[in-house]
Image: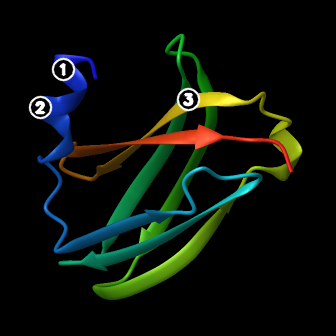
């Protein structure tokens, strides 16, 4: 793992963050414990560092469960990095692997 990604992994102030399944086929499930209501940005990058998906969600405080639907993206198999940032710019990164059905 690139050292700069490792540093960012622990920055976002979430009590809980689960991203699954990993590997994924076309959707990513997220379970987050959000400390305060705010806007979150979800950016998915391929191994070359190219942005392949971006979504913004206004989340309420508390437990949040939702999906990021990547079906229309037709992403090739391989490694991806999901970067989650909040209004303060704090970031957490998760490495995911895309596989074919």
Give left or right: position of 12 versus 70: left
Q: Residue at x 12, y 47 (%)?
A: 11
Disc 3 or disc 1, which is closer to the eye? 3
Vertical comparison of 37 with 92: above or below: below
The numbered mark, 3 or 2, whose residue comes first in the sequence reads 2
Q: Is residue 64 left or right of residue 35?
A: right
Task: Give the image location of residue 100, x and y in percent.
Answer: 82, 42
Do the CB atoms of the residues marked 2 and 1 lie less than 8 Å apart? yes
Answer few, some or many: residues within 10 Å of disc 1's Cα (few below 14, many 20 plus, some between 14 and 19).
few
Which is more toward the observer, 94 or 88? 94
User: How crowded is the residue under tag 2: few (<14 C-alpha within 10 Å), some, or many (20+)?
Assistant: few
Between the C-alphas of marks 2 and 1, the distance is 5 Å
Residue at image location 52% in from the left, 54% down from the top: 56
Q: CA distance from mark 3 to mark 2?
A: 19 Å
Q: Which label number is shown at residue 4?
A: 1
Q: Quick one: SS at disc 3?
A: strand
Q: CA distance from mark 3 to mark 1?
A: 17 Å
Residue placed farthest to the top in the image? 48
Task: Give coordinates of residue 29: x percent, y percent.
Answer: 57, 68
Residue to which mark 2 is pinned: 7
Point out residue 81 in the picture as x, y percentages from the top left corner. Answer: 46, 34
Crowd rating for badge 3 (residues with CA inside 10 Å; few <14, some 14–19, many 20+): some
Residue that mark 3 sits on:
79
Query: Is the residue 95 above or below the residue 67 in the image?
Result: above
Q: Secondary structure at mark 1?
A: helix
- Total marks drawn? 3
Q: Are marks 3 and 2 in contact (CB under 8 Å)?
A: no
Q: In the figure, residue 59 lies in which quadrant? A: bottom left
**In terms of secondary structure, where does tag 2 sit?**
helix
Q: Quadrant of the N terminus?
A: top left
Horizontal side, residue 74 vs residue 22: left or right: right
């Amino acid at each position: 793992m690139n050292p700069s990604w490792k540093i960012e992994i622990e920055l976002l102030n979430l009590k809980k963050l689960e991203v699954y399944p990993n590997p994924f086929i076309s959707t990513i499930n997220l379970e987050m414990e959000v400390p305060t209501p705010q806007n979150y940005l979800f950016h998915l990058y391929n191994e070359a560092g190219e942005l392949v998906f971006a979504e913004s969600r206004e989340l309420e405080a508390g437990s949040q469960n939702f999906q990021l639907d990547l079906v229309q993206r037709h992403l090739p198999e391989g490694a991806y990095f999901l970067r989650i940032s909040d209004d303060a710019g704090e970031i957490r990164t998760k490495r995911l692997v895309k596989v074919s059905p």
